Amino acid sequence: MRLHTAPDHGVVGQVATAIAQAGGIVTAIDVAESSHSRLVLDVTCSAGDADHAQALRQAVDEVEGVEVYKVSDRTFLLHLGGKIEVGSKVPLKNRDDLSMAYTPGVGRVSMAIHDNPEDVRRLTIKGNSVAVVTDGSAVLGLGNIGPGAALPVMEGKAALFKRFADIDAWPICLATQDTDEIVKAVEMIAPGFGGINLEDIAAPRCFEIEQRLRERLDIPVFHDDQHGTAIVVLAALTNALRVVDKRLEDARVVLSGAGAAGTAIVTLLVAAGVTDVVVVDRAGALVPDLDGISPAHRELAEATNPRKVTGSLHDALAADGGADVFIGVSAPGILQPEWISDMADRAVVFALANPDPEVDPGEAGKHAAVVASGRSDYPNQINNVLAFPGVFRGLLDARAHEITVDMLLRAADAIAHSVGDHELNPTFIIPSVFDPNVPKAVAAAIRGDRQE
């Protein structure tokens, strides 16, 4: 906050006190200007969220003799001008440089690719580039906010690709939510990319888009909201069950949310050997004859719920002695903490709704043996950045044309085993996103080679 105050240095203490009493943390107060008529103060403080920041501003504004002149949010400041840029990898200092990087030298390279199309990955950026494609219809937990509002998220994804796997990724925000148009647009830009990362496209449209693109393109297509989430959930569950001494094959799993992420998680869990999964949606536990469910949900019901559990989420968690695992990819606050006591002993709870989970992780921890969430302020953060950089690094290195279920299983296993036996405990079932060995291990798993 930039403040204009009366020329009294004692006001600095009053401002600090007001912020502290409102629950803020002052990290710096600097006198930017001082004169006989006024002081200009720059105050830097931490707030819990946007509402708390507004409360801090109001608290300072109420200090006598203080005017809040301007407020800057460091998150917004970080986004000014965008978060990524294009840089040249070659020097362009003289005519000789230009003659090789551009005309006339570049013409020889273009003709070489024309004569031998496979060289495009070696002689251009295609071999290290990914398109991050969205229609803005399901952005984070914000919903259908459109392609422009989705751009900061896609920029962030591109920045993560670069930071964790040295991949050049490009945000592609499409001004359509028509399935045919999205498929056609991606087809048309595909020659310039080594892989396609679909992002924040609403279900069920995302399923058809991914399927059609996989059929038509000769480069891998990966929907991170589905498969990235599924990889990390399987990795975390593998280790959580190691902690509570249960086997994946024996675990009873209740999953809340039958959208893109939920469907992909179920598919990968079943491929990994889980035999008992009950999917719960707004209509309750999914069974094939449930009234009013979509064809996609009916297909999911037919592939799950072998015990034919019916009823609410609470019913599904408590049925037949209780579920061993709850996985939530649905909505905030739908799981009451005390329901966890009706689950089996040493229960595992993954509350992954973003930004607000299905149950408060702290409260869940009073009843469950292992708790994970999507939040960074609690242990065991389930974060897709553990998967997608390494997945695409491996795909690009291998010059892969597709991604298989077996690759996804190997990636999950690589993440799980990035946590050593000596490290594993209820508050550490998944490695840090900043562990440099994770993307390397995932890439090696995708390529199919051994990571020493």
Image: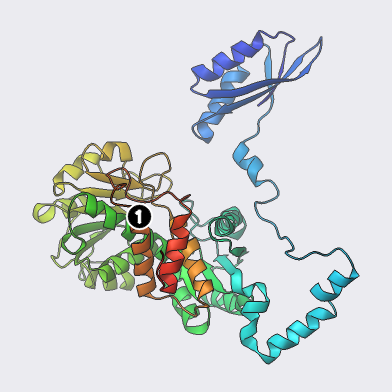
Q: Report the front residue among 363 and 247.
A: 247
Q: Residue at 63% of width from left, 42% of height from top?
A: 76
Relative side of 128 to 334, left or right: right
Coordinates of residue 164 in the picture (x, y in percent): 53, 56
Specify the quadrant of the image occupied by residue 173.
Answer: bottom right
Q: Against 416, is 432 above or below?
A: above
Coordinates of residue 347 in the picture (x, y in percent): 19, 48
The residue that disc 1 covers is 329
Q: Report the front residue among 15 and 28.
A: 28
Coordinates of residue 365 in the picture (x, y in percent): 26, 39
Q: Residue at 78% of width from left, 85% of height from top?
A: 108
Relative side of 193 to 285, left or right: right
SS at badge 1: loop
* Furthest-bottom residue in this view: 115
Q: How many marks?
A: 1
Q: Residue at 62% of width from left, 23% of height from top?
A: 28
| Residue 200 visible somewhere in the drawing | no
Relative side of 130 to 444, left or right: right
Q: Report the front residue among 303 and 44.
A: 44
* Furthest-left residue in this view: 320
Q: Give neighbour class at mark 1: few <14, some 14-19, many 20+ (Cα, 10 Å).
A: many
Q: Against 50, is 31 above or below?
A: above
Coordinates of residue 166 in the picture (x, y in percent): 58, 61
Locate the N terminus and report the quarter of the image it occupies.
top right
Q: Against 318, is 173 above or below?
A: below
